[in-house]
Image: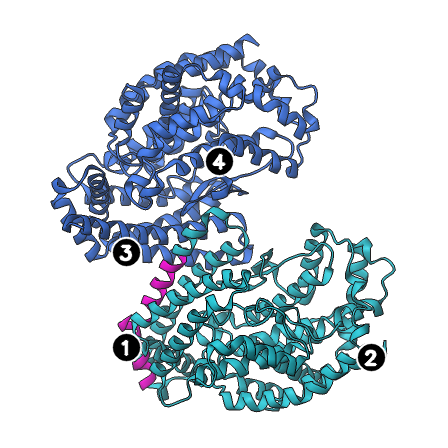
Chain colours: A cyan, B blue
């Protein structure tokens, strides 16, 4: 082996040892959310803290940093795939080394504390209790951004943690296009608001949890989820995590509404299919890791929305659903499609429909950017939230609990995270359109339960690349266009036309 | 805080950080045995290896070793409980530092390989395939013993890993007493061998697994297991593990034999009650950790045998069992007692009854001691095994699979482990006798389902001390006698008298 190859092999081995520790951390967290006995929560938090610190130590170990720098200095001698791993590792390492260990510790303690405060503040509808903590979080994130790169806008630096290479300016342009296109659609939804819940009851009724467990497994399996290297369990807040090559999805069931668990399962299956589609030969390296939060979300949204709410999908699924649930006797395909495409302005992001969801995100993007650049004070948040909700969605929360206090992201220190959700929607529509442009209309395949055609295309165009390309480049390569809201708007327009036609 | 207290506080914090990592390791292992998808096994093994190496690094970190040495040097200034923690930590640290890291790595690789070879050798009944590996294991364990203390017999040094302070000579004396007392009991069992299975069918029939799950939970709960800080799950080979303050037991079910799962559950509950009874204020330190393998086994055996096979216990449990399982209709208390006390010479240790079990262990002790001191060659093992089985139990395996190949312990490198099982039986009988001597006969309480009297006594006399005392001292303090086989022999004599009377 050449000297360069040897150094690269050492990098891979170091990254894989870090990944092993990260995987142990993921398992501690998965276990905490699924099966941990209540009395063991406190010690679990400590175990997670200790392991996270051990991992951080490895990631900032001087010998490791030197190895990365040495490889970066000779990047011209690396082959292209080695160069990707060195480039991305160096990027992460350079961000991490800018942060004083004291700031890292202070920041993670602050986030843990503020999350705790948020739980009670939301319960008590007490924004004033959270406000000083939010102020501290904003201030700390500004310090973090400055430490990493003081020449660029702080928000851009934070955003890149979730969407590398994306700037607030380009996001602004994209969201402008999205917002402009969405407004007339929202107006149309509002006009038919009185008819909103007409179809909603088609998937409501008696859905025993054990039958749902079997049915949701069947759905994940049919979509292509590999249960030989994965599990489906239950958690209060559904999530997907990867423990090595073992991808675990979680969902939760409502015994009176099939949609509640099913769409969580499909969404998480989308995340899982991405993880299971990464290059196993590149595990532990950037090439074997997901590209960005936005790209990850595009995979969950594509299966949830483009596929899971389509007539073709339900043409395939309804017979199996009828067999699993006597409550569905007499429900027509049309009834079910109304139930899963029901739309209308609402207060809570996580309960929003496919159309209005994006406005919930744009609102948060506007606000968090202003908080970081200092043009908005924390104290003004509840008022601004209400005004923007009225402006974008025509509804206004009566309480902060249903307003600015609804999400954990800001108290948890995730500033720059929210845009990923809308980016995921934008990318998903763009990818689905590109897939159909390349392989032809997918309706017949989806209606026949042949999901591998679409999955194969995603594996080929997205999954196998890992972090070989940054998100914008990846989307451009896969779809022939830079990120654009047009396909999403077209998709939503068709949804509304369907609702209006019923 | 004084300088001494500060140093001690640093020790505790270091031990607790090590415990956090060990707990993460326990969770990786628990998950592997209970819920891990098949395809993820290889990566899981790697994760465990990486975390074990990280833990070993902490435990042999020069700064940590120096701290331990410094505290040991000023042990006269420590308060008694601090002195216990320093004494025991120093003992473990001194053993660990004697071992060259190369030897540690070589040893653990060898054990992993030999375990793999053993699986196929047992399946194929091919002792010759395992023999060279066993030779290497024996040789390596001798080197380990010599590195730790070359002045003492190698077997003594190995034994102490499992039973600190115990020597082969004192074990020999104890096992001599046990063997002499057991021989006439085994003869009596053999004489009634033709009647052996008379009662065995009382707990055989249709026992649906879901009903067993509920019933086994109920049993663990009644015995005092705290489900707020613990779980009961299923694994092919039942075990108990502790993840922080979260104690997890596992069992496995046979849908045609209630005993199979139930006695595994009671046994593991015994281990778990010990773990849950350790001093929570001393967690992570020797004072908050189990005393030895033998003491641990005494807790599982006491609940399994002294309690779980008694008339009093079944007087309490039978109504609940009848309610849970229609198959028990018409089964009398006497039938059930015959079924759970069924005895007779057999080939497989893990399936042996309460009486003959101890001879299986004494046989293994004889052999492993001779292997280590060089008086027995690996090649002679199958022959020696058969001779000893005939001599002790009057039965002889037709295959090595049912003979010397049946246990994983030796290929897995656990030499000196087997005696813990018989020590557990000896200690259990001694403790139960002492408990009755102190609080009076327990039959009425057990028959009424009041297990807290006995559990309270064990907590007071055994659990709360952790490693404050070495095993022999702990047993002597709790029972007023040094370890003796007499109470176990008396207990088994009563069992046989019961069997003979039916």
Q: Mark 2–mark 3 contact, CB under 8 Å?
A: no
Q: Is residue A200 left or right of residue A171?
A: right
Q: Looking at the image, is B277 positioned above or below residue A116?
A: above
Same chain? Circles 2 and 1: yes
**Residue A431 visible in the picture:** no
Is-magenta flag for residue A54? yes
Q: Which mark is residue A500?
A: 2
User: What label does residue A125 carry, if any?
Assistant: none
Q: Which residue is mark 3?
A: B58
Do badges 2 and 3 share one subunit? Answer: no
Q: Which residues are magenta?
A: A48-73
x and y percentages locating residue B146 in the rendered image: 20, 42
Residue B225 is labelled as 4
- Marks 4 and 3, the one that precedes in the sequence: 3
Discs 4, 2: same chain:
no
N-terminal of the pair, mark 2 or mark 1, is 1
Give the foreground label among 4 and 1. 4
Alpha-carbon span between mark 4 and mark 3: 33 Å
Magenta segment's dominant SS is helix
Residue under the image location 47 percent in, 24 percent down: B305
The quadrant in which residue A298 appears is bottom right
Q: Is residue A190 above or below residue A45?
A: below
What is the C-alpha distance between the residues marked 2 and 1?
Answer: 62 Å
């Amino acid at each position: 082996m050449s000297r360069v190859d040897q150094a690269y092999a050492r990098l891979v081995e170091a990254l894989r040892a870090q990944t092993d520790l990260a995987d142990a951390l993921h398992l501690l967290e998965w276990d905490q959310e699924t099966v941990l006995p209540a009395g063991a929560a406190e010690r679990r938090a400590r175990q997670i803290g200790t392991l996270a610190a051990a991992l951080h130590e490895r990631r900032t170990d001087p010998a490791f940093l030197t190895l990365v720098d040495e490889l970066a200095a000779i990047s011209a001698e690396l082959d292209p795939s080695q160069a990707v791993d060195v480039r991305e590792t160096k990027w992460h390492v350079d961000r991490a080394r800018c942060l004083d260990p004291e700031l890292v510790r202070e920041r993670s303690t602050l986030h843990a504390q503020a999350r705790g405060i948020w739980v009670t503040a939301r319960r008590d509808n007490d924004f004033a209790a959270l406000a000083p903590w939010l102020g501290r979080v904003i201030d700390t994130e500004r310090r973090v951004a400055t430490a990493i790169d003081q020449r660029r806008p702080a928000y851009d630096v934070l955003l890149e943690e979730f969407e590398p290479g994306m700037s607030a300016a380009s996001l602004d342009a994209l969201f402008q296009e999205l917002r402009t296109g969405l407004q007339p659609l929202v107006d149309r939804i509002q006009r038919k608001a009185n008819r909103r819940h007409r179809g909603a009851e088609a998937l409501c009724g008696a859905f025993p949890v054990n039958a749902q467990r079997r049915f949701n497994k069947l759905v994940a399996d049919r979509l292509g989820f590999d249960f030989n290297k994965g599990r489906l369990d239950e958690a209060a807040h559904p999530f997907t995590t990867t423990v090595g090559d073992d991808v675990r999805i979680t969902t939760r069931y409502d015994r009176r509404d099939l949609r509640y668990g099913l769409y969580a399962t499909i969404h998480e299956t989308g995340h899982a299919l991405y993880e299971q589609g990464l290059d196993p030969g590149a595990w532990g390296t950037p090439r074997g890791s997901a590209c960005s939060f936005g790209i990850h979300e595009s995979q969950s949204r594509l299966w949830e929305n483009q596929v899971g709410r389509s007539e073709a999908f339900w043409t395939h699924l309804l017979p199996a659903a009828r067999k699993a649930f006597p409550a569905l006797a007499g429900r027509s395909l049309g009834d079910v499609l109304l139930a899963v495409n029901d739309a209308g302005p609402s207060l809570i992001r996580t309960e929003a429909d496919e159309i209005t969801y994006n406005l919930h995100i744009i609102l948060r993007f506007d606000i968090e950017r202003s908080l970081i650049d200092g043009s908005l004070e924390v104290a003004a948040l509840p008022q601004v939230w209400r005004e923007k909700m009225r402006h974008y969605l025509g509804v206004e929360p009566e309480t902060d609990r249903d307003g600015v206090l609804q999400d954990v992201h800001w108290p948890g220190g995730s500033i720059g995270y929210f845009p990923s959700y809308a980016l995921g929607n934008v990318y998903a529509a763009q990818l689905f359109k590109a897939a159909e442009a390349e392989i032809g209309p997918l309706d017949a395949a989806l209606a026949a339960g042949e999901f591998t055609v679409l999955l194969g295309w995603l594996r080929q165009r997205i999954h196998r690349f890992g972090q070989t390309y940054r998100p914008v480049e990846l989307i451009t390569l896969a779809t022939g266009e830079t990120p654009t809201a047009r396909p999403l708007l077209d998709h939503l327009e068709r949804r509304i036309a369907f609702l209006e036609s019923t």
